[in-house]
Image (cartoon, rainbow, N blue to C red):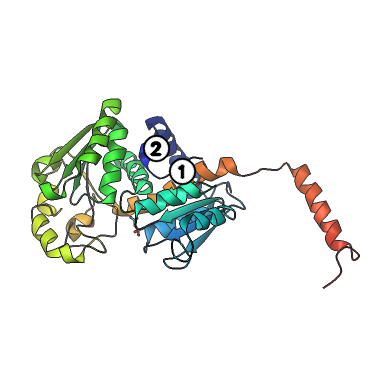
Amino acid sequence: MRHFLDTQDFDQSELLSLMTLIGLLKRADKLGALPPLLAGASLGMIFEEPSTRTRVSFEVAMTKLGGHALYLKPGEIHLGQRENIKDTSQVISRMVDAIEARTLRHQTLLDLAANATVPVINGLTDYNHPTQVVCDVFTMLEHKLPDKELTDLRVVFIGDATNVCASLLMMCTRMGMHFTHVAPPRYQAPEAWQAIGRKNCLLSGGSLTISEDPVAAVREADFIYTDLWWWVGQEAEIPERRAAFMPRYQVNAALFDAAPAHAKMMHCLPASRGVEATDEVLDHPRSIIYDQSENRLHAEKAILVKFIYPRLRKAPSSLKQWHAGQILSFLNDRTLNPTP
Ligand code: CP
């Protein structure tokens, strides 16, 4: 069974095909012509952490496709507490068509997937965020200069080596794009991620650069991307992290002005406005942060269709009619089915 846990589990042609599907579903949706491809299907959405974009996009995507989503919020189910992950995963798999999970630890997601009998979709872990970056590269394709190919694009990620940075590094290098991570040495992408990126580049023709110099890095950027400098659980490190990143690594007007006139500003959100990026760049005419957020919805639709649609049983209408007849004749037979 295939799951959607990491873009590294998919080759370039599969990821490109996913981009095409996102475009088809987005176009149909904008015209009110989206087919109910997931009618009758259910998605279990497990969240160990709060979420705005991931939660809303998956739930709305299921509704738009004719299916249903259950929001299993932090602390609401027995995941790893009072019930082991195997039992939770097996039980939920018997009732839904796919599981989307945001887990604090990546290992929890891997354990869920190892025991699931339906596809599991990664909604963010402490390691990576693949649904975000599929959406991001689709957004880049929408906003690139018309004369550039995907493999011409230069993406400069400035800031902490977050889970989004990990996924973006891997996705861009897999797609043959040119990815630069800019951060102080202590916060740069670890060697293990770089090794994956370099291997991707050998196959794809992309490139991976690690740099300490944001001004030099943005000079040829098509897209400048940043993310939070600290997350829940890193509060004790805030003074040290702020000192390491501020002011040199903040994406502000001065840094944005050093980029080409066509460069676009990206952020996965939520943002700490005034910290990793200032209002003037997040709200700049060349900021595409809200297009990015909207595209989470279109990307989730494509991922859900790709993983759920082929598994749905599609009985012919004759079989449906035969079963309806059997059930109705039982219900209407007062001997077999006495009125309660
Ligand atoms: N970018 C992202 O995943 O946002 P949420 O945490 O709101 O889901």
| Quadrant in the picture for residue 274 | bottom left
Q: Which residue is tagged 1?
A: 3
Residue 136 appears at what percent x and percent y? 33, 45
146 and 296: which is toward the camera: 296
Q: Is residue 52 left or right of residue 64?
A: left
Q: Earlier in the sequence, mark 1 or mark 2?
A: 1
The magenta stretch spans which residues? 223-228
Please provide percent x and percent y for residue 34.
54, 47
Image-based side of 298 in relation to 338, left or right: left
Magenta stretch, main secondary structure class:
strand
Question: Can residue 173 be seen here?
Answer: yes
Looking at the rendered structure, which numbered label has been put on residue 154? none
Q: How many marks?
A: 2
Q: Secondary structure at mark 2?
A: helix
Residue drawn at x 37%, y 51% is: 107
Mark 1 C-beta closer than 8 Å to ligand 1? no
**Residue 9: assigned label:** 2
The reply to whether callout 1 and callout 2 are in contact (CB within 8 Å) is yes
In the rendered image, the residue lying farthest to the bottom is: 340
Residue shown at 80% from the left, 56% from the top = 327
One can see residue 120 in this view: no
